[in-house]
Amino acid sequence: MVDAARARKIADRIQRIVAEMLDRRIKDPRLGFVTVTDARITADLRDATVYYTVFGTEDEKAASAAALESAKGVIRTEVGRQTGIRHTPSLTFVVDEVQENAQHIEELLNKARQSDAELAERASGAKPAGEADPYRVPREYEDEDE
């Protein structure tokens, strides 16, 4: 087991190595516009998860995933060579769905804004159901001494 700071440094290094490999050395035509967004490694440095996004259609995303799986051995060899740790971690590639989640949240916020605007428009001409001032005003007692 290693401390969290060292594991984070190694994960950052793995992220840079994988991004450089995809940019310069992996020439698979199935590989689309791939961006490595994050890498995480277990505390025992045995397994690394690399998160990536692909810009394109679902078919291009599937082709890019297949290209990454086929290039996994070459990438793992380079990770082992450049990191210099005793046991090269196994790599797992996972599609990072941050963009899709952010887009979904933005759509939900737009719906909420529209419904708020409609509600404000309907409420603009509304009158209170009861009295205009629903709070009781304390009685003012006249001072009997005066």
Image (tube, helix red, strand yellow):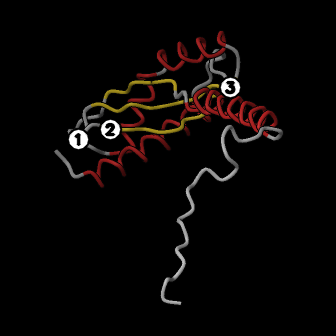
> In x, y percent, where is residue 20?
56, 39
Q: For mark 3, give the secondary structure.
A: strand
> In x, y percent, where is residue 106?
67, 33
How far apart are labels 3 and 1 at the CA level? 31 Å
**In the rendered structure, are the residues bearing label 1 and label 2 in contact, judged by CB atoms less than 8 Å apart?**
no
Nearer the N terminus, badge 3 or badge 1? 1
> In x, y percent, where is residue 109?
66, 34
Q: Nearer the viewer, residue 59 or 17?
A: 59
Nearer the N terminus, badge 2 or badge 3? 2
Q: Nearer the viewer, residue 92 or 86?
A: 92
In the figure, 48 relative to 82: above or below?
Answer: above
Disc 1 target residue: 43
Disc 2 target residue: 41
Q: Nearer the viewer, residue 93 or 115?
A: 115
What residue sits 54% from the left and 90% below the top? 146
- In-image side of 77 versus 60 (left or right): left
Q: Quadrant of the N terminus?
A: top left
